Image (cartoon, rainbow, N blue to C red):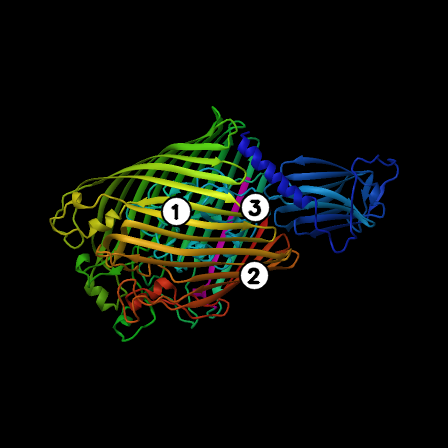
């Protein structure tokens, strides 16, 4: 084992031991005295009777109390089996009223089962099984019984920003397993428990992240993450390291996998080049479900939701998912199946919300299915081979459209649903990826990771009325993005110096992608005669021509723990990309052929950061990092005028320089972070309707904060703060103006309070406030420049152990506020000015079997 890992495990052991040595005592039991487990055994003929068993949750885990008037005579020996800690109590007998066995499932987070049985005529066996790892324990006796105090070593916390798990590792920041406190970046980790809780109000990842991650814009309620910027720029979305972006940005990166297949989500805020192209705003790495350490785990969940103001068939949604994981010897597998039918959405006034008012991809009236599988084999103690497969398929099946006539009514009008839609090819997303990973933890004293992946992707948009845009050929059309990508990564982590306090990560990435954006064109007369409901296809055309992108990246990253207080990070990445375009025709000029060509891009990027621990609880960090992204070439090509030359495009990618400072605190009952950032780019990339690309200097700055506190063992409170500003020099003359609202969100505040009202029953209230932003004047109606009004919404989430499983209840928009998401407020046309959902009730039940 490497010295760095040994040091980390020693720190972890000390942290856990500090809790074990001070267990919380049950209010029902007198103050205990530590038990000497080495005392001589009593006479075997004198069996001690245990007349009762109690399981009491504590701040650190739980206590199993065995009621006996002769507790001092009970002797304990232990053994481990997987995640189970087994305590055998000799010369004792369980003598309960009724059946002489005791069992309880999921008594606290981190513990799946507690059983107490008579192992034989003179031995009681207590078995406590941890959810993710082996529990720790300590023994006490009192005047009334024996107390076994257990600590679940991986108790999941509800704070996304500062997950209070000493062994929680982050892989996105440095591409290696790095403790959060050693990363000079702002990071949010959302674990499986929190994903499941947030899914009680919405299964949409866009909403889950928007409500929990500082730095992200307030969430919309559709299938598109357009406008969901991270620090004012686009994030790079990965699933187990596989990029979900496409050369022609479809803004669907977060609608490629179901939440049920996700173990955790790691968000590294701020530009990064560690994974290559695209992370100018940061990295969102989705980690899929991992195999259980138990021999067999099986869980089923069923759910239903509906708008409380419209308890009709149209508003009902249902979902079913099943997770199974097994481990036998050196082989393991994980499988998750999720199917969902999402009904119609209704606003707080009881009106139906159009299924897709923004032509960006709707989430209502949709059916989805997700198949996920992971198969792994431990070749030996150092080598592992793992294959992951995921298939996500989502389609809208609706007869609802947005009424175009509201655009002719004076004043600002709410989007209005119109029944009778006739459309053959339904909007939706299809995403398939296969990921093969190989790791070797000790190859010539280095750790090797290799990855091969393949991804096939299709998204189909809702039809768009482009009759008023000459650049769109004055057509009514429906586009789709088709993308096929494959690639590989190879990285090696090599310890430096004798002590191994420094590690060098180096390697290579390669990817190849083919992308195009064809369109279906519709009969305009039929559209007008039907009032915007009939889409009769008349032909197919190319909008964005087929693009072939090849990218090669070389990188090296140093992580150096100079002392127990000071950590240094630094690295460099070189990226080279080639784009090939064949001859093509545009939507606006279908009879004119434009010659293709090749483009070459390259960039060299650096990062430098440090963390200094002021004391064991408080640390400060500073970071300089560069990120880059290729300009949306497809967007520029689809608007190419006659005589256009591919080689005339500016081949220089968007390069972002980011500066960040922050402070993090990690105390027993409080976790907090505060960071400030500034980033700039000489050739930023901004879009205006109907798809013009502006390359101009940009600068973005802001503050982010997060705090979580546990005033007692049953209460948790916290919140986040996000304030971002941004400017652009459109004319490159030194005169900056504000960036549009799709890029720069208003002030965002979140807060929550959570209480374990009774053992096994938790209740949570969470709130989101989105502020005003009126930097362009109240009468501005240009793309992304409309004024944004504030709104405030509250959700309620409750979970309770019930029978063999857990019942979860969610009330979204508890006070039934009528409000409009930021993205809707920024739309130029009223037919896209859609309200948010009103009060919506969700109920789901999950159980293990």
Query: Is residue 562 one of those drawn in magenta?
Result: no
The reply to whether the magenta stretch includes residue 321 is: yes
Q: Position of residue 619 (x, y in %)?
A: 52, 47
Q: Nearer the viewer, mark 1 or mark 3?
A: 3
- Which residues are the magenta region? 311-325
Residue 711 shown left or right of residue 495 in the figure: right
Q: Position of residue 132 (x, y in %)?
A: 59, 42
Describe the element under mark 3 as helix, strand or loop.
loop
From the top left corner, tell me how far across and down residue 732 is, in percent: 22, 54
**Residue at the image point whose x is 58% and y is 54% from the top:** 670
Do callouts 1 and 2 mark residues in contact (Cβ within 8 Å)?
Answer: no
Local packing at callout 1 (Cα closer than 10 Å; few below 14, some 14-19, many 20+) is many
Q: Is residue 502 left or right of residue 45?
A: left
Q: Residue at x 60, y 53 (%)?
A: 669
Mark 1, secondary structure of its residue: strand
Mark 2 vs mark 3: which is more N-terminal? 3
How far, Cα to Cα, is label 1 from label 2?
30 Å
Q: Is residue 281 left or right of residue 146?
A: left
Q: Which mark is residue 615?
A: 3
Q: Is residue 225 visible?
A: no
Residue at mark 1? 237
Q: Residue at x 17, y 51 (%)?
A: 640
Q: Nearer the viewer, residue 561 or 815?
A: 561
627 and 757: which is toward the camera? 627
Q: Earlier in the sequence, mark 1 or mark 2?
A: 1
Q: Which mark is residue 753?
A: 2
Q: Secondary structure at mark 2?
A: strand
Task: Looking at this view, name the residue that lies furthest to the bottom.
Answer: 410
Question: Which tag is nearer the camera, tag 2 or tag 3?
Answer: 3
How packed is label 3: few (under 14 Cα within 10 Å), some, or many (20 or more)? few
């Amino acid at each position: 084992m490497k010295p760095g890992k040994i040091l980390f495990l020693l720190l972890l052991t000390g942290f856990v031991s500090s809790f074990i040595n001070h267990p919380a005592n049950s209010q029902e039991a007198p103050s205990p005295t530590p038990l000497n487990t080495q005392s001589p055994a009593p006479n075997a003929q004198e069996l001690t009777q245990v007349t009762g068993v109690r399981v009491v949750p504590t701040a650190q885990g739980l206590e199993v109390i065995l009621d006996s008037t002769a507790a001092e005579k009970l002797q304990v020996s232990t053994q481990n089996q997987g995640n189970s800690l087994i305590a055998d109590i000799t010369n004792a007998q369980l003598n309960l009223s009724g059946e002489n066995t005791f069992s309880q499932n999921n008594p606290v987070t981190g513990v799946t089962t507690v059983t107490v049985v008579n192992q034989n005529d003179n031995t009681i066996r207590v078995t406590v099984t941890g959810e993710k790892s082996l529990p720790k324990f300590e023994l006490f006796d009192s005047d009334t019984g024996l107390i076994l105090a257990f600590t679940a070593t991986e108790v999941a916390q509800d704070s996304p920003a500062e997950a209070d798990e000493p062994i929680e590792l982050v892989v996105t920041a440095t591409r290696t397993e790095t403790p959060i406190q050693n990363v000079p970046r702002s990071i949010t980790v959302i674990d499986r428990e929190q994903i499941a809780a947030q899914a009680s109000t919405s299964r949409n990842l866009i909403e889950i992240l928007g409500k929990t991650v500082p730095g992200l814009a307030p969430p919309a309620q559709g299938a598109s993450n357009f406008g969901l910027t991270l620090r004012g720029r686009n994030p790079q979305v990965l699933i187990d390291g596989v990029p979900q972006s496409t050369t022609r940005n479809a803004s669907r990166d977060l609608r490629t996998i179901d939440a049920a297949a996700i173990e955790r989500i790691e968000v590294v805020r701020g530009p990064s080049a560690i994974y290559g192209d695209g992370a100018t705003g940061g990295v969102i790495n989705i980690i899929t479900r991992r195999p259980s350490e138990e021999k067999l785990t099986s869980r089923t969940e069923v759910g239903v939701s509906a708008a409380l103001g419209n308890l009709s068939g149209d508003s009902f949604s249902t979902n079913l998912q099943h997770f199974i994981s097994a481990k036998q010897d050196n082989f393991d597998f994980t499988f998750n199946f999720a199917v969902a039918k999402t009904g119609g959405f209704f606003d707080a006034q009881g009106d139906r919300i159009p299924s897709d008012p923004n032509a960006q991809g709707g989430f209502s009236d949709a059916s989805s299915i997700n198949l996920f599988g992971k198969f792994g084999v431990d070749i030996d103690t150092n080598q592992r081979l793992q294959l992951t497969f995921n298939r996500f398929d989502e389609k809208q099946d609706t007869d609802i459209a947005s009424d175009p006539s509201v655009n002719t009514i004076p004043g600002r009008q709410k989007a209005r649903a119109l029944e009778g839609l006739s459309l053959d090819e339904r909007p939706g997303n299809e995403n398939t990826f296969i990921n093969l990973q190989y790791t070797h933890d000790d190859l010539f004293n280095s750790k090797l990771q290799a990855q091969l992946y393949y991804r096939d992707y299709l998204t189909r948009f809702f039809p768009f009325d482009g009759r008023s845009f000459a650049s769109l050929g004055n057509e009514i059309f429906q586009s789709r993005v088709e993308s096929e990508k494959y690639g590989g990564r190879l990285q090696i982590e090599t310890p430096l110096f004798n002590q191994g306090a420094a590690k060098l990560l180096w390697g290579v990435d390669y990817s190849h992608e083919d992308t195009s954006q064809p369109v279906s064109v519709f009969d305009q007369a039929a559209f007008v005669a039907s009032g915007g409901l009939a889409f009769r296809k008349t032909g197919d055309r190319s909008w964005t021509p087929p693009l072939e992108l090849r990218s090669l990246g070389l990188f090296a990253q140093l992580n150096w723990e100079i002392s127990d207080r000071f950590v240094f990070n630094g690295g460099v990445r070189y990226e080279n990309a080639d784009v090939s375009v064949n001859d093509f025709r545009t939507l606006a000029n279908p009879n004119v052929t434009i010659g293709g060509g090749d483009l070459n891009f390259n960039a060299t990027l650096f990062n430098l950061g440090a963390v200094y621990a002021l004391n064991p609880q408080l640390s400060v960090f500073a970071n300089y990092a560069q990120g880059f992204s290729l300009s949306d070439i497809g967007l520029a090509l689809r608007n190419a005028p006659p005589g256009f030359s591919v080689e005339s495009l500016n081949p220089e990618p968007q390069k972002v320089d980011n500066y960040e400072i922050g402070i993090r605190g990690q105390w027993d009952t409080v976790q907090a972070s505060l960071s400030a950032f500034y980033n700039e780019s000489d050739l930023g990339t901004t879009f205006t309707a109907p798809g013009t690309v502006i390359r101009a200097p940009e600068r973005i700055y802001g503050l982010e904060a997060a705090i979580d506190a546990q005033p007692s063992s049953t209460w948790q409170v916290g919140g986040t703060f996000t304030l971002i500003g941004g400017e652009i020099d459109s004319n490159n003359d030194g005169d900056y103006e504000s960036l549009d609202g799709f890029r720069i969100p208003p002030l965002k505040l979140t807060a929550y309070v959570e209480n374990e009202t009774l053992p096994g029953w938790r209740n949570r209230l969470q709130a989101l406030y989105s502020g005003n932003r009126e930097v362009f004047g109240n009468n501005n109606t240009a793309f992304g420049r409309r004024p944004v009004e504030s709104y405030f919404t509250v959700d309620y989430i409750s979970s309770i152990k019930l029978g063999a499983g857990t019942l979860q209840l969610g009330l979204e928009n508890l006070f039934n506020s009528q409000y409009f998401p930021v993205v809707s407020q920024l739309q130029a046309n009223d037919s896209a000015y859609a309200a948010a959902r009103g009060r919506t009730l969700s109920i789901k039940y999950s159980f293990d079997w």
